[in-house]
Image (cartoon, helix red, strand yellow):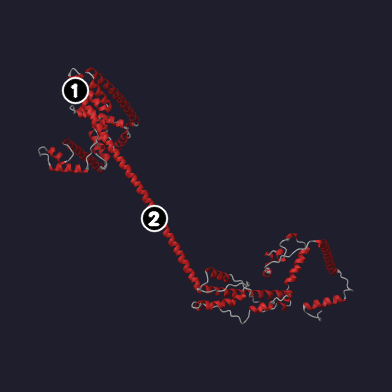
Amino acid sequence: LVVLGSSTRGQAFWIQYIMFLLKVLVEPVGRWFEAYIRRRNRNLSASFQELEEEESSSEEEDDEEFQLQEHPMLRTLDPKDWKNQDHYAVLGLPHLRYKATQRQIKAAHKAIVLKHHPDKRKAAGEQIKPLLQRAFDSVDPTFDNAVPSKSEGKENFFEVFSPVFERNARWSSKKLVPYLGTAESSFEEVDSFYSFWYNFDSWREFSYLDEEEKEKAECRDERRWIEKQNRASRAQRKKEEMNRIRTLVDSAYGCDPRIKKFKEEEKARKESEKKAKVEAKKKEQEEKERARQAELETARLAKQKEEEEARQAAQLAKKEKEVQKKAIKKERQKLRTTCKNWNYFADNEAESVKMMEEVEKLCDRLELTSLQSLNEILTSGSKEESKAAVEKQVQEVNALLQKEKEAEVQARQAARNAEHASGGGGGGKGWNEDDLQLLIKAVNLFPAGTNARWEVIANYMNLHSTSGLKRTAKDVINKAKNLQKLDPLQKDEINKKAFEKFKKEHTSVPPSIDNALPSERFDGNANPWTTEEQKLLEQALKTYPVSTPERWEKIAAAVPGRTKKDCMKRYKELVEMVKAKKAVQEQVAAKNKK
């Protein structure tokens, strides 16, 4: 063997030749015998399989003839992508699929191979390019791979780039290649052109430039290494080719005047749409504003109408009230005159005075209809009938007053119970009637806004209270809050007590005051002094000193709307305020010294 050849291929050839010469004389033994047995068994199994296939084919001879449905894109399929292809469709059996028999599959395969075999296609007159021809065409030295720059194509875009795209269209795997077009091409045509070239599928390959040929390799490892090197170099050249095509498309896209025109049109369209949206929104806002103004105007007119109706109703009510007031006044005067003419149905002075008081009660308590009915009886009836009618009305009014008095007593008792339950409402210290009246007077005397108001009020009460209890600012605040929570009946009760106290202190009381309601007699805020009146009073006090004769008449004349009594009362209140403030200041100073 050493003499015959040192290469592996040569040794194998001579071994096979020697075995052929000695095959009759040599009997396999050992591992060679085992290999022979395996080959023989394999051959037997193959023969049995062929026999079964022949039997199945003989059984299917009577099968109906079938028609092949050839795949329309069969020649464009990539053999490397065979896993993603429909094999029944490739064989022309998509209508049979799993029902296809072995004979049908073999027959379909044979028919397709015979139809598309290069020799058959060439005999039919089709031009068949050998692989070596395509490899050479891919590296044709006469082909111009140059790509125009952007500066070259800015002025004459179509003249520069159109021939370049036509020249490179030869590498397209697809036969229908769009042209560059003209300046009048539509947006769809231009978009289709650049979409095609940005997804360009090139058949150009560079196997012709392989540095090594795998057929020259002496062994399998060397052949694999050569194939690996060739694949790497082809992939690198293919990448460079695709970069060249991409650079060509990018340059054309950047210089294409149609793209610039389409962008400007698109920009103008978007601006127009934006402007239209703004105008529509503005119009909508204007419509909303008009609707809102209309609603406001409608509401204003409705409100104006309501106010006018309310004003007219108020005027009508005022007129009716004035008419009723005049009517009541007339009826009251008529009642007084009639009773006076009858000498108040009395025989002596005391009874006359008592009946006069009762008549005044009737004037205050009876309504218009009751007064009219009573006056009719007094006008048409005799003295006895009139007296009886008046006494009956007096009894009814007195009964009503008695019920009101009982209700006031119950309310007063409830207030006392509540005061007792809360510890007197002022820090556990009891409040008598005099202290309550003094608190009300102090609160009205020192209004809100007075510096250290509650300390001033507490000091004022401590100076003028007869109970001997010292009140703090906290006690005064708690009691004032408690008084604010009282109902109107309780407030009237307090005012009534104040009036009774005033009546005891002043023996002579005018009848007009005696007939007034308790809430109308002592209301500290009934006619409060305004800032302007206060200024006029202070100026009048400076203008007219103590030595001025008829001083207070002149001061009252200087303050419009105020009487001599009002001015004197206000002056006393101011004096008390000044004294109370001085006392508080002295206390604060004493505390600071300590």
Residue at image position (66%, 74%) is 231
Identify the amino acid type marked 1: Lys
Q: On screen, 417 above or below 239?
A: above
Q: Circle 1 — which element?
A: helix
Q: Measured from the top left, where is residue 441 in percent x and y?
A: 24, 35
Residue 592 - label = none
Residue at image position (23%, 19%) is 381
Residue 400: quarter of image: top left
Q: Measured from the top left, where is residue 535 in percent x and y?
A: 19, 44
Q: Find disc 1 in the rendering and name its residue.
A: 340
* Residue 79 vs residue 14, the one in the foreground: 79
Q: Residue furthest right?
A: 25
Depth-wise, is mark 2 or mark 1 nearer the camera?
2
Q: Measured from the top left, where is residue 211 in percent x and y?
A: 66, 79
Estimate how packed mark 2 is, as few (under 14), some (14 to 19) or many (20 or more) residues with alpha carbons within 10 Å.
few
Q: Is residue 416 left or right of residue 387?
A: right
Q: Find disc 2 in the rendering and name its residue.
A: 286
Q: Circle 2 — which element?
A: helix
Give the mark nearer the N terminus: 2 vs 1: 2
Number of marks = 2
Residue 318: quarter of image: top left
Q: Measured from the top left, where is residue 15 in percent x and y?
A: 83, 76
Identify the amino acid type marked 2: Glu
